[in-house]
Amino acid sequence: MESAPFPGSKRNLTQDAFDLLLAQLDVNRHEAGKKYEILRRKLIKFFEWRGCSFPEDLADETFNRIAKNLDKGEEIHNFTAYCAGTARHIFLESLRTRRREAVLQDIPQNLPASTEEPDLRRGCLERCMQELSQEDLNLIVEYYQEDKQARINARRNLAARLDIPLNALRIRTYRIRVRLEACVDQCVKGFKGKHEMNEQRSHSNVKESRDS
């Protein structure tokens, strides 16, 4: 299930920043408020048409980001164009997030099965994905992003776009997966090792306090 984008962004918006945003819409605060609601509905439609799961949140984030930039002293000469550009940028961010989450949901099924510490392995997978090059990250994300029904055609299209045989694409993604598997295993072992050391120190401290 897709998580809500930009959690907590509204809480970071100050009243001064919001006032600067309204001032861009109209010098009359009442009129600015009406224009704000009209523009917000348009932004919601913009994100809905693109299949976003949380169009209201993305519309609010668009306003929030503009308001924060105004609060930092940025000058906006064409508010409509600036708003449209910000919305497009936020949509692309949300799209990358959705693709990344799809990979995180799928890849663990292809990693060695483990009933121990599933949350730990997922956290390690996220960390290991950040260590990939941008090219490898984009490749593995696109390779796993579709559901099972559409995946075959999507992978064929990906191979065609990269101008490589489908088998070569499988080999490249397999090698990335092997690196991810090794990285995840090393991360899990490292975390468990630190956890065991901390437990041993805790037991030692308890024993020393009892003996003293």
Image: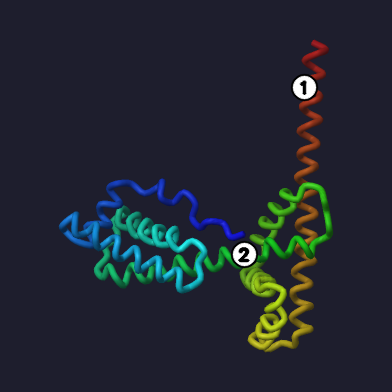
Quote the CA–CA distance across marks 1 and 2. Answer: 43 Å
The amino acid on which the numbered mark 2 sits, given as a three-letter code, is: Arg
Q: Position of residue 62 (x, y in %)?
A: 39, 61
Secondary structure at badge 2 equals helix
- Point 73% across, 48% down: residue: 120
129 and 117: which is toward the camera: 117
Image quarter in which the C terminus is found: top right
Q: Position of residue 171 (x, y in %)?
A: 79, 78
- Point 76% across, 33% down: residue: 198
Task: Please tell me whether residue 55 is drawn above or below residue 200 in the rendered image.
Answer: below
Mark positioned earlier in the residue sequence (1 or 2): 2
Image position of 27 (left or right of 125): left
Task: Please tell me whether residue 95 is drawn above or below residue 34 in the rendered image.
Answer: below
Dividing the picture into quarters, in which one does residue 142 lie?
bottom right
Image position of 128 (left or right of 50): right
Q: Position of residue 100 (x, y in %)?
A: 62, 64
Q: Which disc is residue 205 wearing?
A: 1
96 and 77: which is toward the camera: 96
Secondary structure at badge 1 equals helix
Q: Which disc is residue 93 wearing?
A: none
The amino acid on which the numbered mark 1 sits, given as a three-letter code, is: Asn
Crowding around mark 1 (Cα neighbors within 10 Å: few <14, some 14 to 19, many 20+) is: few
Q: Which disc is residue 100 wearing?
A: 2
Image quarter in which the N terminus is found: bottom right
Task: Please tell me whether residue 194 is drawn above or below residue 189 in the rendered image.
Answer: above
- Point 69% across, 83% down: residue: 153
Q: Position of residue 136 (x, y in %)?
A: 67, 71
Crowding around mark 2 (Cα neighbors within 10 Å: few <14, some 14 to 19, many 20+) is: many
